[in-house]
Amino acid sequence: MNKITLIGNLTRDPEVRSTPSGVTICTFTIAVNRRFANQSGERQTDFFRINAWRQLGDTCARYLQKGRKVAVIGELQARTYEASDGTTRMSLDVSADEVEFLTPKAADDSGSGYSAPRPQAPAQDLAGFTDINSDDLPF
């Protein structure tokens, strides 16, 4: 089974692009602190590149930004590429299955939180109904 769970902070704003067939992909990097300090007392940090696809990618692109804390569950994928100096290099990416936003709404700088705009409920017509006092109820 290939499954990884990470909790970290975004190092920069997410990047959004689409495949030629129109599928959305949102890419962002998170910094994850290790649990223990090294010999000199410093905590090491690992950086993971996250790829969120389709609707999950749209949601991440809309609500995430640099500094936000997220939990990511996904699949670890190894890929190779040729660097500008001609050497072959390897990269580990995470293909996200789930992304949970962990930054509390109160810590959100814009004050808007993560909630999407909600449609207004239509006004209800109360014609034919009678207001009653709760003291009149038998229970």
Image (cartoon, rainbow, N blue to C red):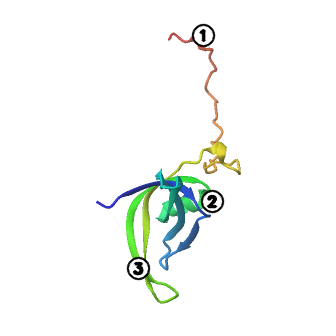
Percent x, y of residue 75:
38, 63
Say which label, 1 or 2, has the lower sequence index: 2
Percent x, y of residue 120:
65, 45
* Contact, mark 1 vs mark 2 (Cβ under 8 Å): no
Label 1, secondary structure: give it: helix
Q: Could you tell me the amino acid type at mark 3?
A: Thr
Q: From the viewer's perspective, is the residue at label 3 or at label 1 nearer?
A: 3
Q: Could you tell me the amino acid type at mark 1?
A: Asp
Q: Could you tell me the amino acid type at mark 2?
A: Lys
Name the disc covering residue 66, or none.
2
Seen from this angle, which residue lies furthest front?
40
Q: Is residue 84 visible?
A: yes
Say which label, 2 or 3, has the lower sequence index: 2
The Cα–Cα distance between marks 3 and 1, rounded to whole angstroms, is 73 Å
Q: Give the labeled residue for mark 3.
A: 80
**Crowd band around label 3 with a 10 angstrom C-alpha radius: few (<14), some (14–19), many (20+):** few
Q: Give the labeled residue for mark 1.
A: 135
Q: Is residue 53 visible?
A: no
Q: Residue at x 70, y 50 (%)?
A: 109
Q: Quadrant of residue 28?
A: bottom right
In this rendering, position of residue 122 left or right of residue 102: right
Q: Residue at x 38, y 72 (%)?
A: 78
The Cα–Cα distance between marks 1 and 2, rounded to whole angstroms, is 54 Å
Name the disc covering residue 94, or none.
none
